[in-house]
Image (spheres, rainbow, N blue to C red):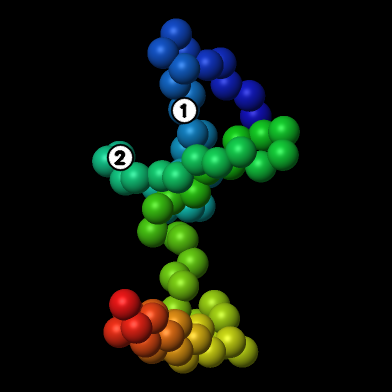
Amino acid sequence: MTHRVGAKGQIVIPKEMRDVLGIKPGDEVTFWLDGDHVAVRPEGLRTPLKGRFPDTNLADALLEDRVIDREREDEH
């Protein structure tokens, strides 16, 4: 499936693809370069950060860093 790029650099996402992704008029989408092509994703499909790093204890590491920062501030 090919489409021509318009004078303003605009393209049309084919209806079949919009339907599969649930993209409707007015929705926000995200674009990024992926190697030699451009990828597009509806903004709502972004994977949330919560639960993405189940085997790490990032919150504890952040709290430890805050304690160290406070100790350094108290020294000055």
User: Which residue is painted at 34% across and 45% down in the image?
Assistant: 28
Residue 13's x, y, as percent? 49, 34
Q: Is residue 64 left or right of residue 56?
A: left
Question: Which is more N-terminal, label 1 or label 2?
Answer: 1
Residue 26's x, y, as percent? 27, 41
Within 10 angstroms of label 1, few (less than 14), some, or many (20 or more) residues?
Answer: few
The one of 69 and 29 positioned closer to us in this rendering: 69
Q: Is residue 14 visible?
A: yes
Task: Give amino acid for label 2.
Answer: Pro
- Mark linked to residue 25: 2
Residue 33 placement: quadrant = top right
Q: CA distance from mark 2 to mark 1?
A: 12 Å
The one of 45 and 35 positioned closer to us in this rendering: 35
The one of 54 and 23 positioned closer to us in this rendering: 54
Outermost residue toward the front in this view: 76
- Mark linked to residue 12: 1
Outermost residue toward the top in this view: 7
Please, what secondary structure does the residue beneath circle 2 have? loop
Considering the image in quadrants, where does the C terminus appear? bottom left
Residue 9's x, y, as percent? 47, 17
User: Which residue is painted at 66% across and 42% down in the image?
Assistant: 34
User: Which residue is painted at 41% across and 13% down in the image?
Assistant: 8
13 up-or-down from 56: above or below: above
Q: Is residue 66 visible?
A: no
Q: Is residue 42 left or right of residue 32?
A: left
Q: Is disc 2 in contact with disc 1, using a CB cutoff of under 8 Å?
A: no
Residue 38's x, y, as percent? 60, 36
